[in-house]
Image (cartoon, rainbow, N blue to C red):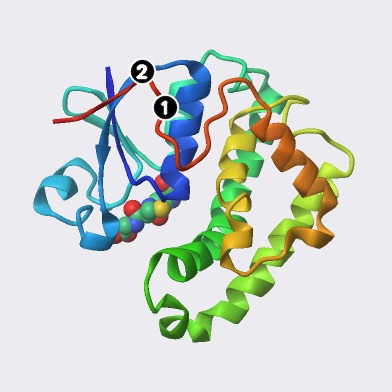
Amino acid sequence: MYTLHSMQRSGNSYKVRLALAQLGISYRLAEVDILKGESRTPEFLAKNPNGQVPLLEVAPGRFIAESNAILWYVAGGTQLAPEDRIDRAEALQWMFFEQHSLEPNIGAAYFWLALVKGGRELQQHALEDWMEEGYRALGVMENHLKHHRFFAAGHYTIADIALYAYTHLAHQCDYDLASFPYIRAWLDRVAAEPGYVPMNLQPENVVAAE
Ligand SMILES: N[C@@H](CCC(=O)N[C@@H](CS)C(=O)NCC(=O)O)C(=O)O
């Protein structure tokens, strides 16, 4: 059984919890409070030298970090991970976009504005850039969704899961999605997918790690 090192309110961790729930995969859950430095202890760094969640132990002593790499691993061989060469490249394209254009802006804004007390004051200098670049990324997504129901392969895939995580949190960190009707409709479509679990809910097939 997998052990997932995750933080409940981490969007990157949520991607993996959502995929595991939708795939009906049971796993152990180890809650890591990054705000208390729990991802930077020597024990944790021995598992992931980069000191971040999510982290999936796939076999004793064998760990995979990086949310989108974990998504490919757990979804491999299922409908969620396209096999066809062009479909796979398309999914990867959006997942790299998520890591380069969406997560560094909306993810950072969410972390500092929604999770860290006093974060707004601490990061005032960075906010304007996160807003500008975050809106730019949302614009790219909105344009794609005008002509597509999902991001890759013509159906719901891990590319949607990757992009959903921080997009559905955008309203919690100053972004206004009112002028993004196609994104809002896609958020609803993702939430209607079988096995969907919201970020604040722990799936039933999870046992706490010792
Ligand atoms: N690119 C990584 C980013 C992971 C990441 O930023 N994790 C945050 C939580 S969302 C974290 O663990 N931060 C703690 C730290 O850096 O000390 C991924 O997609 O998994």
The answer to whether residue 151 shows anywhere in this view is no
Residue at image mark 2: 26
Residue 59 position within the rendered picture, expressed as x and y whole percent measured from the top left = 23, 21
In the image, farthest residue toward the right: 147
Residue at screen point 89% across, 39% down: 147
Residue found 66% across the figure and 69% down from its top: 133
Give the mark count.
2
Q: Residue at x 57, y 41 (%)?
A: 162
The vertical placement of 71 against 32, above or below, is above
Question: Badge 2: few (under 14), some or many (20 or more) residues near its Cα, within 10 Å?
Answer: some
Say the numbered circle drawn on residue 89. none
How many neighbours does mark 1 have within 10 angstroms: few (below 14), some (14-19), or many (20 or more)? many
Residue 159 in view of the camera: yes
Amino acid at pointer 2: Ser
Can you say which quadrant of the picture contains the N terminus? top left
Pointer 1 residue:
203
**Near-viewer residue (30 or 51):** 30
**Which tag is nearer the camera, tag 1 or tag 2?**
1
Label 2: which secondary element = loop
Q: Where is residue 64 drawn, in percent x and y?
A: 32, 34
Q: Secondary structure at mark 1?
A: loop
Name the N-terminal-most of marks 1 and 2. 2
Location of residue 25 by image quarter: top left
> CA separation, marks 1 and 2?
9 Å
